Amino acid sequence: MTIGSFINDVSALLGAAGLSYRGQLQSALWKGVPFGVTTSRARFGRRNVVHDYPNRDAPWVEDLGRGRQVIHIVGFLLGDDVIAQSKRMAAVCQQRDSDDQGGELVHPQFGRNRFSLLDFAITHTIEGRFAELEFSFVNSTPRIYPVSITATPQETLAAADDADSAAADSFGSRIAAALQQGAAVVQSVVGTVQQYGGQAFSLVADATSLFRTVQALPGEFGRFFDGASATLLGVTGDSSATSKPPKTVSDLIASGAQSRANATAAVSAAQSSAASLSASTTADLGAKAQAVMATLGSATSDPADRVRIFQVLATFVPLVSQGSASVATAQSATSDLWRRAAVSALARATAAYQPASQDDAATVRDAVVTLLDAEIDTAGDQGEDSVFSAFRALKAAVVADMNARGAGLPRVITVSFAAPLPAPLIAMKLYQDASRADELIAEADVVHPGFMPTSFRALAS
């Protein structure tokens, strides 16, 4: 049997099965106008850039992605109405595409796809009833336009400002009538402010202690203390994202002393405002309470520590002294003012906090939402509509922000090994990146990086 007869036999067999070559061809169309095809040439490939280097025998080829798909077609129009066919084809070839994806081309071999026409020529012969067509097409993709993205941290900050304003206004409305009862009411306000101020100062002292701030130092010494400030919520955010650069021990001591002095001044200003409180100065006390929170926030260089201390202050419950109904109202209104200022400051802290994982973001979100829900319920029970609405909006902003920033982060998983291994080796096994060993050391909280626990939690990727 010759090769030719073998090919004929195979062709006949495929044709019998309905798979003949001509049976697979599709009728050629360009934007709905049919035409015949005599020859077609398609060019495909990759966009490669060849880099040559001195003293290197072989170049490095950089792949920039799939190359252009260029198709050249030679076709024809045939019939007594060839002039009308030619005009119709010329019209669609000159027609502007309705979008940036080109027009629809049905290729006999490659089928239906969208292409942009680069060039078109039509040739009429003297014999008539026949026109030769030449096309050049290139594949086209949709143009990508910029899209707007909501800056969720800024939304949180704006909502926190609105919550502060609503809380200050509510404080003024609730305490105005009670202030008419005399000095006992003012003294109860002063006592409540002193308690919150004392708690705020103790938190500043804690946040600026060397144990908390030494993690900002460069080198291995600071690394061993990394994450020590984020224990209350169990969060493990990126402590490297600090608002202040690494310092020497002397700089840390000086900075801590300055922060404590600023806190003392802010608390003293709030106590002075409380001592001279009147119906016309309630807004000033609200501003002073929020200034104390701002001072407390600026004293902490680690966003994770900032979240921790504001949660402590937001859950602080001052001692209540016995007195008249007016005194009780004043104490309740003052406590609400300071607690709400702390909750708003906590929400601001989440905007600067960088979660390390989806689990970390969810932990912080849920802890803050719990406090916001409690404040929303309190405002609703007390009929404070503006506070109720403002804190609901703040809750929505915090949830949207933490969900958005946590969505692209890996989850935390439990990893186990048969024996203690060095942190760089585990980093290579998990991430193919030995430089992430410090991340594993901080997560596992080990004494020596050469002997990691056999089981601990780490980022999935």
Image: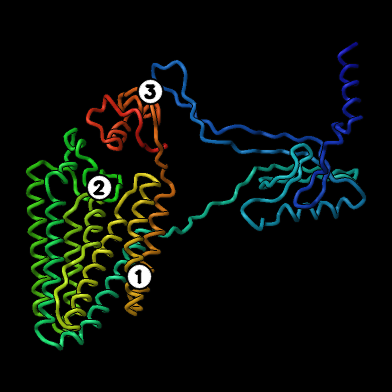
How far apart are labels 3 and 2 at the CA level?
A: 30 Å
Q: In which quarter of the image is the C terminus?
A: top left
Image spot of residue 21 (x, y percent): 84, 32
Q: Residue at x 19, y 63 (%)?
A: 293
Where is mark 1, residue-wise?
376
Residue for point 33% across, 53% down: 364
Left or right placement of residue 436 versus residue 226 in this view: right
Instruction: Residue type at mark 1: give it.
Output: Ile
Q: Specify the quadrant that holds the N terminus.
A: top right
Q: Nearer the viewer, residue 406 or 271?
A: 271
Residue closest to the far front: 322
Q: What element carries label 2?
A: loop
Residue at image x 65%, y 42%?
138
Q: Which residue is more in the foreground, 438 or 39?
A: 438
Most foreground residue, 282 or 113? 282
Marks 2/1: CA–CA distance: 26 Å
Q: Residue 39, which numbered label?
A: none
Q: Which of marks 2 and 1 is nearer the N terminus?
A: 2
Dot 2: within a 10 Å radius of its alpha carbon, few (fewer than 14), some, or many (20 or more) residues?
many
Residue that badge 3 annotates: 418
Amino acid carrying label 2: it is Ala
In the displayed structure, would residue 100 be above or below residue 461?
below
Disc 1: CA contacts within 10 A as few (<14), some (14-19) or many (>=20): many
Element class at badge 3: loop
Q: Which callout, 3 or 2, points to the residue nearer the camera?
A: 3
- Residue type at tag 3: Ala
Image quarter of residue 239: top left
Kindly identify which residue carries mark 2: 230
Residue 412 percent coordinates (x, y): 39, 40
